[in-house]
Image (cartoon, rainbow, N blue to C red):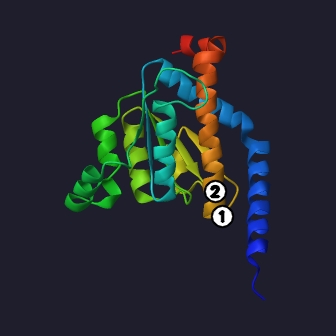
Amino acid sequence: MSQTALQKVLDHARDGLEVRESFFEQYSQLVVDVSRALAVRLALGSKILFCGNGGSAADCQHLAAELVNRFKLERPPLPGIALTTDSSILTAIGNDYSYDLVFEKQVQALGQPGDVLIGISTSGTSPNVICALKEAQRKGMVTVGMTGISAGEMLPICDHIISVPSKDTAIIQEVHIAVGHLFCHLIDHFLFEAVSELEPYLSGE
């Protein structure tokens, strides 16, 4: 017997709540640590690049917008760039070379040592995201992977892994954007509200 529309809503909400609760019970300190690492790089003049496909591409644009505009706090714009937005670049690279290189070549062009690349792939195996993370690693950038229950090929090429304990793509994406919002919230915290908390990490550079 098929589920009713209402039952589908309730089941999805329940599943999402369980995964979200499980993730934050295990990984809240990791979210703080990664956010601090991002704030350190921004404080030192670096920028944050984002890449991903489909819904994850939308998350890249969403989070870059939160940095460049603002999140909650009124503060100066911060340098965030989504590598998913320039259709001429994406189609030129895809046409002349391969779709696998659409982010890698942008990292080659725009990334500098000390910059951050956040690669989002719910499967952990998206070839173009993996290629971009490998290139970022070669360039001495900080690499952050956001994925689902399996880190896949991301694990050995990322300095930080955000792994959501689910195989459901939609639920993984819902937790990814929650974590992304917290990155933005805590970057503001470290850079503009609690600068003294960041100073020991800056002096270590």
Tag 2: amino acid: Ile
Residue 168 screen position, x and y as percent? 65, 64
Question: Where residue 172 is drawn, which disc sits there?
Answer: 2
The residues bearing labels 2 and 1 have C-alpha atoms spaced at a distance of 7 Å
Tag 1: amino acid: Lys
Residue 167 screen position, x and y as percent? 65, 64
Q: Residue furthest left?
A: 96
- For disc 2, the neighbor class at 10 Å (few under 14, some 14 to 19, many from 20) is many
* Residue at x 66%, y 36% (from the top left corner): 31
- Give 143 or 78, whichever is nearer the viewer: 78
Is residue 156 toward the left or the right of residue 179 in the image?
left
Residue 97 screen position, x and y as percent? 23, 58
Residue 152 screen position, x and y as percent? 55, 57
Number of residue marks: 2
* Image quarter in which the N terminus is found: bottom right
- Judging by the rendered image, the residue that carries numbered circle 1 is 167
- Give 189 or 128, whichever is nearer the viewer: 189
- The image quadrant that residue 195 belongs to is top right
